[in-house]
Image: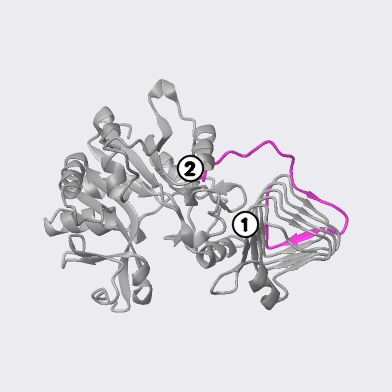
Amino acid sequence: MRGGPSVLGIVLAGGAGKRLMPLTADRAKPAVTFGGTYRLVDFVLSNLVNGDILRICVLTQYKSHSLDRHVSTTWRMSGLLGNYVTPVPAQQRLGPRWYLGSADAILQSLNLVHDEQPQHVAVFGADHVYRMDPRQMLEQHVESGAGVTVAGIRVPRADARQFGVITPARDGTLVERFLEKPQDPPGLPGAPHQVYASMGNYIFTTKALVDALRQDAEDEESAHDMGGSILPMLTERGLAQVYDFDGNHVPGETARDHGYWRDVGTLDAYYEAHMDLISDQPVFNLDNRCWPIYTHPGQLPPAKFCAGGIAGESVVSPGCVIRGQVTRSVLSPGVTVEEGAVVQGSVLHDNVRVGRGAVVRGAVLDKNVDVPPGATVGVNPERDAELYTVSRAGVIALGKGQRVPE
């Protein structure tokens, strides 16, 4: 950070993302398309870069080709100033093995920390949708003298099983307990039906991080996970503090999208987050030019609406050609909706084609899916269940290039 403490950003982008299948059948979860033109990894990288953390390593592992390519071709920083965003694949520096967990991923990549010699290390997850100014979290971290500061957000207690849960001490900032995906966590004082969920974003002093990773590596019983191993360790030592995400403010935010954060780790969450984008006053506003989300725009012409083609409450990307009717949907670049076709409440990835008279409802179609003329997706639940992946809430998902019967 210019004029402040030196910070190295480490983005954990190595997860397999099995709960997002079939969208992750051929790519890492952080490389999944979101919001038309973005990849999930673009949100964390944009937050770090907007917050002046300009030296960032993206740790990758599973099915990483499209993620590596996206980061390499999109996130080009000024070499003159020594800034960079670089993908770092698993290198097996400590032996012939893959990462054992997120903590082991950083342990095996400590050469990156030793090369930069930062005062602090920001370890952020790669697959959440949100805006956050990390400088505000860093300021609290430095002032507190904590070994680690973890970003927390209030969520319903009923959802606690999905997250690491932070129990703050009476002062409201010291972490008293850190429970990884607990079955029955205690509620917050004054709000018994809520808990502090970990956002998967941590800022460490370099010494606290390195010492904890080395001690964890010697524990053969450890899961070698940041949330399951490192945070409980530092909590027991009294070195962990919580940062309340509700106190984070970014330029250009509205009262409606302040504090927005979504873990899109399931098909239903992924779909619902897209539906948050499409209204006139969206729950999450992509058009915040004071805190932009960056990506590579591609070389495509503007979207084209032909005679009879309409789109209402929808996000339509460049290169789309609309001859049919689109409502409450998100269309990635190069989508074609032919005459008489109907697309409702759906998410269509790059180069999807919906043929003449076809109907697509409540679906997520990965890139290069071709819906033949007159075919339907999302109209016949029993037939859809036989042919496609269907989520608990009934969202229909088709993988990359999956065939749709005529």
Residue 95, given in percent of the width and then of the height, sits at 28, 38
Query: Callout 2: helix, strand or loop?
Result: loop
Residue 33, given in percent of the width and then of the height, sits at 57, 51
The image quarter in which residue 387 lies:
bottom right
Look at the image and say whether residue 22 sits in the magenta stretch.
no
Please give the range of residues in magenta: 291-317
Q: Nearer the viewer, residue 315 or 27?
A: 27
Q: Residue at x 43, y 41 (%)?
A: 50
Q: Main secondary structure of the magenta part?
A: loop
Residue position marked by numbered label 2 in the rendering: 64
**Looking at the picture, which amino acid does disc 1 mark?**
Gly
Is residue 187 rendered to the left or right of residue 379?
left
Q: Residue at x 29, y 42 (%)?
A: 106
Look at the image and say whether residue 312 sits in the magenta stretch.
yes
Residue position marked by numbered label 1 in the rendering: 399
| First in residue order: circle 1 vs circle 2 | 2
Q: Nearer the viewer, residue 32 or 175?
A: 32
Q: Nearer the viewer, residue 43 or 244?
A: 43
The image quarter in which residue 355 lies:
bottom right
Question: The N terminus appears in which quarter of the rendering?
Answer: top left
Cα gap from disc 1 to disc 2, whole angstroms: 17 Å
Mark drawn on residue 23: none
Query: Callout 1: helix, strand or loop?
Result: loop
**Looking at the picture, which amino acid does disc 2 mark?**
Ser
